[in-house]
Image (tube, rainbow, N blue to C red):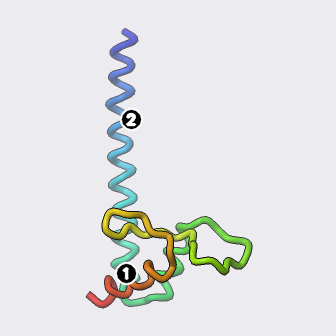
């Protein structure tokens, strides 16, 4: 009985993880496609996904990240360069 409950939990957990992954992927894809020609709206959407910052930051770190070549990047300059390439294609 306990093992069957465990298997039921694992199955449902994996199903939920898959649904969450697909929903996030669809949201990011749709958001970027909808705002591809409107950079202000695109940045507004991207900033809304990051953690709010209450202080002015002078360093190169950001609360917005982008996956570049299988690495997570937080540097504003690299993110801007890669988004520019994406928007021009």
Image coords of residue 15 (percent x, y): 33, 39
Residue 27 rendering spot, x and y as whole percentages = 39, 65
| Residue visible at 42% across and 70% down in the picture | 66
Vertical position of residue 14 compared to residue 80: above or below: above
How far apart in space, not on screen, are marks 1 and 2 (Cα)? 34 Å
Q: Residues within 10 Å of mark 2 (few under 14, many from 20)?
A: few
**Residue 46 or residue 78, whichever sits in front:** 78
For residue 82, the mark is 1
37 up-or-down from 17: above or below: below
Q: Position of residue 10 (x, y in %)?
A: 36, 29
Question: Can you name the residue that lies furthest to the top here?
Answer: 1
Q: Give the foreground label among 1 and 2.
A: 1
Quarter that holds the N terminus: top left
Left or right, 62 with reference to 17: right
Of callouts 1 and 2, the N-terminal one = 2
State which quadrant residue 80 falls in. Answer: bottom left
Q: Residue at x 40, y 73 (%)?
A: 31
Reading the image, the residue beneath label 2 is 13
Quarter of the picture holding the C terminus? bottom left
């Amino acid at each position: 009985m306990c093992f069957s409950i465990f298997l039921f939990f694992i199955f449902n957990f994996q199903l939920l993880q898959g649904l969450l992954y697909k929903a996030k992927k669809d949201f990011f894809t749709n958001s970027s496609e909808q705002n591809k020609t409107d950079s202000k709206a695109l940045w507004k959407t991207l900033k809304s996904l990051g953690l709010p910052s209450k202080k002015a930051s002078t360093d190169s770190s950001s609360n917005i990240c982008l996956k570049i070549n299988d690495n997570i990047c937080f540097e504003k300059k690299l993110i801007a360069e890669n988004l520019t390439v994406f928007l021009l294609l």
